[in-house]
Amino acid sequence: MLFVADTAKERIMEIMRDQALDDSYFVRVSVTSGGCSGLSYTMDFDNESKPNDQVFEDNGVKVVTDLRSFLYLCNTTLEFSGGLNGKGFSFNNPNASRTCGCGESFAV
């Protein structure tokens, strides 16, 4: 399961409104090689499903990931922090053994 914190839900809904995205769009998250810790998160809006997609809905937000990425993201919570010191979207991943200082990459 992938989870969506209230703060992330609010920001996602705001972005979808601003970009005039309809209900066919969802949040696609994935894990790619790279970053200072070895693996990086990616996140975007999409409206096309792919074979082997894992689909979750939490807190009214549909989140989709590919099967390979789900192995790294299982039980991860998508969060958002705004304000002057906010870092935007972040992933609270219980599977990560270490993360880099910027929080954009991790290792398992």
Image (cartoon, rainbow, N blue to C red):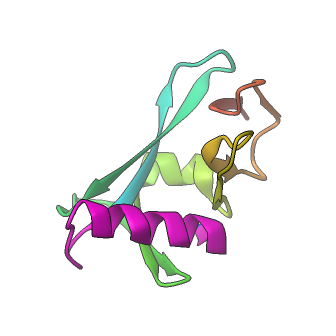
Task: Measuring from the top left, give residue 48's x and y in whole percent.
Answer: 17, 61
- Of 53 and 87, nearer the camera is 87
Q: Is residue 4 magenta?
A: yes
Task: Measuring from the top left, give residue 56's x and y in whole percent.
Answer: 46, 75
Q: Residue at x 72, y 51 (%)?
A: 93
Q: Is residue 51 visible?
A: yes
Q: Is residue 26 visible?
A: no
Task: Measuring from the top left, give residue 24's x and y in whole percent.
Answer: 20, 75
Q: Is residue 66 left or right of residue 98?
A: left
For residue 58, above or below residue 89: below
Task: Measuring from the top left, give residue 64's x and y in whole percent.
Answer: 39, 63
For residue 73, above or below residue 102: below
Q: Residue at x 62, y 32 (%)?
A: 104
- For this orientation, the residue located farthest to the bottom is 60
Q: Residue at x 70, y 33 (%)?
A: 103
| Total count of labels | 0
**Quarter occupied by residue 18:** bottom left
Q: Residue at x 59, y 28 (%)?
A: 39
Q: Is residue 45 magenta?
A: no
- Of 22 and 76, nearer the camera is 22
Q: Is residue 72 left or right of residue 50?
A: right
- For this orientation, the residue located farthest to the right is 97
- For this orientation, the residue located farthest to the top is 36
Quarter that holds the C terminus: top right
The boundaries of the magenta stretch are 3-25
